[in-house]
Amino acid sequence: MKDKRILYVSSEVIPYLPETELSSTAFNVAKFAHSKGVQTRIFMPRFGVINERRHQLHEVIRLSGMNLIINDMDMPLIIKVASIPKERMQVYFIDNDEYFKRKAIYTDEDDKLFNDNDERMIFFAKGVVETVKKLNWAPDIIHVHGWMASLLPLYLKEYYKEEPLFTDSKIVTSLYNNEFQGELNSELINKVKFDKIDNSSIAHLEIPTQENILRNAVLNSDAVIKGSNEYSPEFEQFINDSGVMVLDYQSEEYLTEAYLDFYKENVLELQDS
């Protein structure tokens, strides 16, 4: 795996957000791969709860400045970067004042999902791709963690399908359970359709529950990893029936090595098939 390139795209990463199954897994897997000589880049949203001074975030002017079209609106893309202390790992933050300045992550003070979480997902997916294009950094593997990042497989397979930088990239999605309850804005599917993504690719987004959003991600990934220990029986059956390569749930003590082995022995082998 030495000198392979892995792009980690996660809704949450420690130490920038509190420790959860998702944030710690995304960090630990990237850290372990980095320690084995893998070239890594980590992308996450620049949520307003992240302390920029403490974590020494700074804007990268050469990467910022473009506008992303979200449902026919121009939304400025701001890119910030920081280095994880002691690890020499760079983390890129996708930022926009309208979507990420608020001092909360996914929900308001009444614990209700933000009405624009759907647009934040689209902005994050496009922002990651456009920034990686500017970096001209072609990843061998793109590993997606968390529902906020889970439109990225769809956008890579459909919206950016002609982008040569990602021709040989393999998409791995980690699936986590119970990230949010209820549904996102029902207009999500129409906002995705605005980007001229084929209807047959987005049927699961008609009712944007967490499981349906993950179903869409599964169908647009080359492999998936069970990041949680339990799912609903219906979702387990969907994963089994999808035909996508699966790595079962790994306990924390074996997780990092198991993921790296999965990349090497399974995911990268898909390039030669």
Image (tube, grey):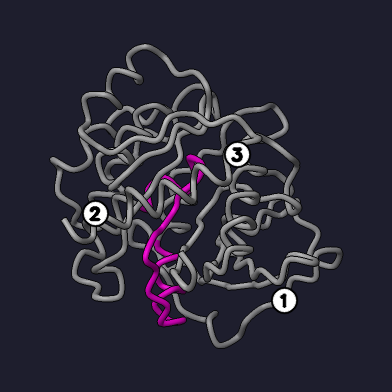
Rendered location of residue 130, percent (x, y): 41, 72
Question: In this figure, which residue is indicated by the disc labeled 1?
Answer: 58
**From what the image shows, is residue 164 above or below residue 18?**
below
Dot 1 falls on a residue whose secondary structure is: strand
Question: In this figure, which residue is indicated by the disc labeled 2?
Answer: 270
Dot 3 falls on a residue whose secondary structure is: helix
Rendered location of residue 36, percent (x, y): 58, 63
Instruction: Answer with left or right where residue 270 lies relative to residue 262.
Output: left
Question: In this figure, which residue is indicated by the disc labeled 3?
Answer: 22
- In this view, the residue in front, 273 or 172, is 273
Instruction: Answer with left or right where residue 271 lies relative to residue 207.
Output: left
Dot 2 falls on a residue whose secondary structure is: helix
Residue 259 shown in magenta:
no
Q: Residue at x 61, y 28 (%)?
A: 112
Tag 3: amino acid: Leu
Pick whichever of labels 1 and 3 is earlier in the sequence.
Answer: 3
Q: Which residues are magenta?
A: 126-152
Tag 2: amino acid: Leu
Pick whichever of labels 3 and 2 is earlier in the sequence.
Answer: 3
Quarter holding the C terminus is: bottom left
Q: What separation in Å lies between label 2 and label 1 (alpha carbons)?
A: 37 Å
